[in-house]
Image (tube, helix red, strand yellow):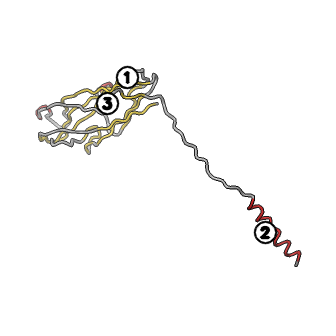
Amino acid sequence: MNMFLRLFFLPLLLLAIASLAEADGGNIHITGNLTAQSCTVDGATDFTLSLGTVDRADLPSVGSTANQVGLNIPLSCISGTKVIIQIDGTSVSDNNTVMVNTGTAEGVGTQLLEPNNNNRPVPLGSSWTIIENSQTSEVITLGARFYRTGDVVPGTVNATATYTLSYE
């Protein structure tokens, strides 16, 4: 019986001693940020563009445009920065380059344009490189205009877009 007790209790005793040797442990979380060379917008970051007043005769058919105006966004950059812009907003259902009018007029929306690219209408929700290799002072140039979407009813025209700049 004495041999049985030794064979039975000796492993249990060794297991108990081994568990006493355990130490507390935990996780190490490492965090940080990596940034690219960047630019800052000089002055105000919000802009208001007035397209003025247009007669509905100046928008004779769906797809007609009128009253293009320009917008310059001045930047101070670290030389050599690649600047990417994304424009977001609510588009009309059948054309993601035309922003929904939130004013009282009907049958008209607005478009943002990229004048340095043959006035290409900007697809909302897309991003593109607007400055490939910056100097220390840069200007992002955009345009805006009326765009006829359907039967026109006179009234106010309003739209809002959000721009986001990122850098590489």
Instruction: Check disc 2: other Cα within 10 Å, few if <14, some if 14-19, many if 20+.
Output: few
Q: Is residue 119 above or below residue 88?
A: above
Label 1 residue SS: strand
Q: Which of the 4 image quarters holds residue 129? A: top left
The residue lying at 23 percent from left, 31 percent from top is 49
The disc labelled 1 sits on which kind of residue?
A: Glu
Of tags 1 and 2, the one toward the viewer is 2
Instruction: Bin the neighbour count of mark 3 within 10 Å (Cα to Cα): few under 14, some 14-19, many 20 and up.
Output: few
Residue at (49% x, 33% y) in the render? 35
Marks 3 and 1, Cα distance to the nearest angstrom?
15 Å
Compared across the picture, whether 36 is left or right of 114 comes to right
- Alpha carbon separation for disc pair 3 and 2: 74 Å
SS label for mark 2: helix
Q: Secondary structure at mark 3?
A: loop
| Residue picked out by circle 2 | 12
Q: Label 3, on which residue? A: 44
Q: Nearer the viewer, residue 120 or 27?
A: 27
Compared across the picture, whether 55 is left or right of 79 comes to: left
Give the Cα separation between the discs numbered 1 and 2: 76 Å
Whichever of labels 1 and 2 marks the residue nearer the N terminus, that label is: 2
Mark 3 belongs to which amino acid? Answer: Ala
Q: Which residue is mark 1?
A: 138
User: Are the residues at dot 3 and dot 2 in contact (C-beta closer than 8 Å)?
Assistant: no
N-terminal label among 3 and 2: 2
